[in-house]
Amino acid sequence: MKVLKFGGTSVGSPERMKNLLDIIDASERQVVVLSAVSGTTNSLVEIGQAYLVGDKTKAASLISALKAKYEIFIKDLFAKPEFLEQGKEVIDYHFSLLSSIANDLFTPVEEKIILAQGELLSTTLYHVYLKEIGVPSVLLPALDFMKTDEDNEPVVDYITSHLIPLLEKSPDNNLFITQGYICRNAFGEIDNLRRGGSDYTASLIGAGIRSEEVQIWTDIDGMHNNDPRIVQGTKPIAQLSFDEAAELAYFGAKILHPQSVFPAQKYKIPVRLLNTMDPQAKGTLITNDSEKNQIKSIAAKDGITAVKINSSRMLLAYGFLRRVFEVFERYKTSIDMITTSEVAVSLTIDDTTHLAEILGELKAFGDVEVDADHTIICVVGDFAADKHGFGSRVLEALKHLPLRMISYGGSNHNLSVLVKTEDKVEALRSLHSRLF
Ligand code: ASP
Ligand code: MG
């Protein structure tokens, strides 16, 4: 059984939603995961923020603006009055729920209920549409099987034990529609897998039901070998290993939610990235295999802050790095890149929420320098230690730019450098023209 996930733009208009059936083969048994209609989750975030600051008038006007969009949406989606009526009931239900939050105490629980409405709307409307055109389908509530634990980690075994019986209940049905992104947390409350989490849902379902393949349908023809918004002539990568895909997704390739790689990798489920606008294009296939002797792709991650700690106490000392890392751990701040010398260590973070407190504690170890507005450029490929030449090609391509940090050898498939964000475009272009 395959799992197909369609992103926000793939359900972004009534026409797009109708066209999904060009891709979904209704004669095959499969799970279809939908995101919210594009723009909806952003609007829901704004509605939540308005409630959070107590601005109920603003929340009400944001809600009615969003509702108006859906009223137009269903007029084009449905042809028959009785189904248009059903669509209207769906909208009324979800929007009155959004409005009713005004009467509650606003807590993170309410905020997550708000955020869940986008996927609930898109899947229910699509399900009603399938009914109208006479295509049998079952709507599976993700809240009945998608679950996270106390550490907010999804529980694959729970998905298996709750989703398989739901699928078995309808042995003659082919099409199962469900919501991406939303889940229940350890307390049974409505929660989510964080922004962009529908990809993660698809991979988790794929793992949970040991699917033959997970397909992520977006509006680009696979993962490209560089950022197509910045560099001309980028190409889709035909094949990637899970490790390479995870690095690229984490370091900037917007097409895939970084965590979504891991469940598929663990259960060896192939993941295909495909393009709704060009369904025949091959896209990118992600499996356990890595192609030898190749540089695959370049990605960039902005908003990086580098922190350098200079300390004579580091010289010949043990336990120094542990104490430095513990400071970051206390403030739940994750570190991306590290480089060390005998008397100094540099590391990077992307979340500066607790930077002031972190710096305050680090000063006890020595001199601390901070450089904001940096970008990690990550080159992914087969960088096995017994090969030579790739590292020098990367550095050669960047020889005219100041490099703040270089990280190589952490894994066999990544060489990363830290540059000023103002040098990013030049770095990406120069690497592209010299490596590909
Ligand atoms: N609708 C959610 C978001 O916009 C989840 C997703 O689309 O993947 O973040
Ligand atoms: Mg996405």
Image (spheres, rainbow, N blue to C red):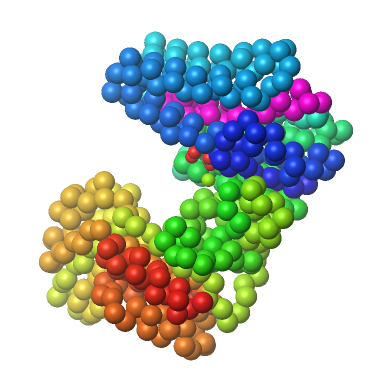
**Quarter where residue 135 is shown:** top right
Residue positioned 25% across, 75% down in the render: 402
**Which of 129/365 is in front?**
129
**Which of 339/221 is in front?**
221
Q: Is residue 338 visible?
A: no
- Measured as percent of width and height from the top left, residue 103 is found at 39, 10
Q: With 322 as the anchor, is 242 left or right in this view?
A: right
Residue positioned 26% across, 50% down in the render: 352
Q: With 59 as the anchor, is 131 left or right in this view?
A: right
- Measured as percent of width and height from the top left, residue 388 is found at 48, 89
**Quarter where residue 281 is shown:** bottom right
- Measured as percent of width and height from the top left, residue 9 is found at 56, 40
Residue positioned 61% across, 79% down in the render: 292
Q: With 370 as the anchor, is 77 left or right in this view?
A: right
Residue positioned 29% across, 67% down in the render: 423
The magenta span reads 108-134
Q: Is residue 84 visible?
A: yes
Does the magenta segment cover residue 109? Answer: yes
**Quarter where residue 296 is shown:** bottom right
- Measured as percent of width and height from the top left, residue 313 is found at 16, 73
Q: Residue placed farthest to the right in the image? A: 172
Say how many tags the image has.
Answer: 0
| Magenta segment, prevailing SS (helix, strand or loop) | helix
* Above-or-below relation of 264 to 321: above
Does the magenta segment cover residue 362? Answer: no
